[in-house]
């Protein structure tokens, strides 16, 4: 039995893929690793095939035409046989100690279910992740100790408040595979930033969760071409706006609020963060077209979902990115610069 499926979408990742896979094969026969070679033109596919040859019971390689990160995740989910499902980007890796602890926990739940039909493994596991600025020799761990009870299965009703710069991202999440499939999540192809959809859309299908206070995911920052690089974000701002729009429309928060009000509050806040990111990077680009686009995305939201617009504009963080006048825009950008310095994101 495979306790965990790890999907590794990769495109031209020859510089990083060995480090990633070396960290994953430590899981042994308890895991399956699905490497999705998304039309690479370098040695990525050959490296992946070597690992499949060396570890045939663990590693599977899929070669496909380029469809973007989302299509790689979709392919991995379609093939997954593990009880849980995790995405690891090809330039990132997992911490060995935390990885072993995670697998031990999952196996413990599986053993309990064999002897106690009431026992139930949680729908979602949440772990810490680390921003690794390898070029600078610095790192920043993001944890959720202030939000979730530690080490036990709980419900959304038991969660506490997230800090302003704290939210759930793909790197922190490990869903039960059947929950993901039940949610029907399918990520759009040829689109950047789809990890935001993966970390949002399935949440209403999660009934139970468990936070493990371990620094599992190691997130590499510092590449010039990285999607979270500020210059790259600005150049791909329409992609960010597209994903923000998908997230804002894919879940009816009124339905979620009726069942899980705390979850609905978090999800509304998540949309707020995404609106803030889109707004800030439009303002950072500085040209008149971007300023007009900034006004347009808020006007579109107001027309399409007045209730959500009101909450985001007047009660959430994103409202601070839509301050009127030149001074308001300057305050938004300066606030972003300060937050970037404090939280060490790219």
Image: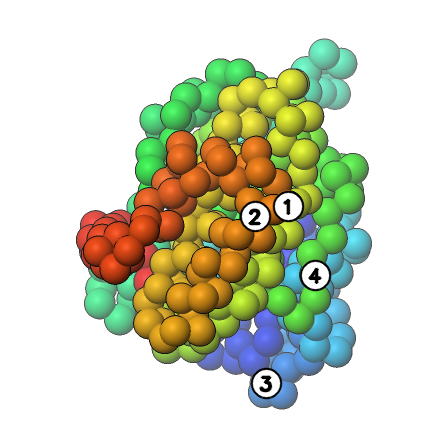
Q: Which residue is drawn at 76% across and 14% down?
A: 117
In 3D space, how far apart are the residues under numbered discs 1 and 2 (Cα atoms)? 5 Å
SS for callout 3: loop
In front of the other: label 3 or label 4? 4
How many other residues sit within 10 Å of disc 4, few (<14), some (14-19) or many (≥20)?
Answer: some
SS for callout 4: loop
In 3D space, how far apart are the residues under numbered discs 1 and 3 (Cα atoms)? 46 Å
In 3D space, how far apart are the residues under numbered discs 2 and 3 (Cα atoms)? 44 Å
Residue that mark 1 sits on: 304
Which mark is first along the chain, 4 or 1? 4
Which mark is first along the chain, 4 or 2? 4
The location of residue 43, given as percent across then percent down, is 59, 85
Left or right of 12? Residue 66 is: right
How many other residues sit within 10 Å of disc 1, few (<14), some (14-19) or many (≥20)?
Answer: few
Quarter that holds the C terminus: bottom left
In 3D space, how far apart are the residues under numbered discs 2 and 4 (Cα atoms)? 21 Å
Residue that mark 3 sits on: 43
In front of the other: label 2 or label 4? 2
């Amino acid at each position: 039995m495979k306790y965990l499926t790890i999907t590794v979408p990769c495109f031209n990742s020859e510089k990083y893929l060995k480090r990633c896979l070396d960290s994953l094969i430590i899981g042994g026969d308890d895991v399956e690793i699905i490497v999705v070679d998304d039309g690479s033109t370098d040695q990525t596919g050959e490296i992946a095939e070597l690992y499949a040859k060396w570890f045939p019971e663990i590693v599977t390689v899929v070669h496909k035409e380029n469809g973007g990160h989302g299509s790689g995740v979709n392919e991995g989910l379609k093939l997954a046989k593990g009880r849980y499902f995790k995405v690891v980007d090809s330039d990132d890796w997992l911490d060995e100690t935390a990885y072993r602890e995670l697998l031990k926990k999952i196996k413990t739940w599986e053993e309990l279910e064999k002897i106690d039909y009431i026992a139930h493994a949680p729908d979602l596991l949440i772990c810490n992740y680390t921003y690794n600025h390898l070029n600078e020799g610095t790192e920043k761990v993001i944890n959720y100790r202030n939000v979730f009870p530690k080490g036990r299965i709980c419900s959304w009703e038991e969660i506490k408040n997230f800090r302003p710069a704290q939210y759930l991202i793909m790197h922190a999440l490990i869903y039960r595979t059947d929950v993901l499939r039940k949610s029907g999540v399918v990520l759009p192809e040829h689109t950047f930033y789809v990890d935001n959809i993966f970390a949002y859309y399935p949440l209403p299908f999660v009934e139970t969760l468990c936070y493990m206070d371990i620094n599992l995911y190691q997130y590499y920052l510092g590449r010039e071409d990285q999607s979270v690089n500020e210059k790259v974000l600005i150049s791909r701002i329409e992609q960010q706006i597209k994903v923000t729009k998908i997230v804002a429309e894919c879940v009816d928060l009124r339905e979620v609020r009726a069942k899980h009000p705390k979850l609905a509050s978090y999800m509304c806040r998540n949309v707020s963060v995404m609106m803030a990111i889109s707004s800030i990077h439009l303002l950072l680009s500085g040209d008149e077209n971007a300023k007009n686009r900034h006004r347009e995305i808020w006007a579109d939201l107001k027309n399409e979902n007045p209730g959500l617009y009101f909450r985001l504009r007047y009660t959430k963080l994103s409202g601070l990115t839509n301050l009127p006048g030149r001074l308001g825009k300057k305050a938004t950008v300066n606030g972003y610069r300060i937050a970037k310095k404090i939280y060490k994101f790219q």
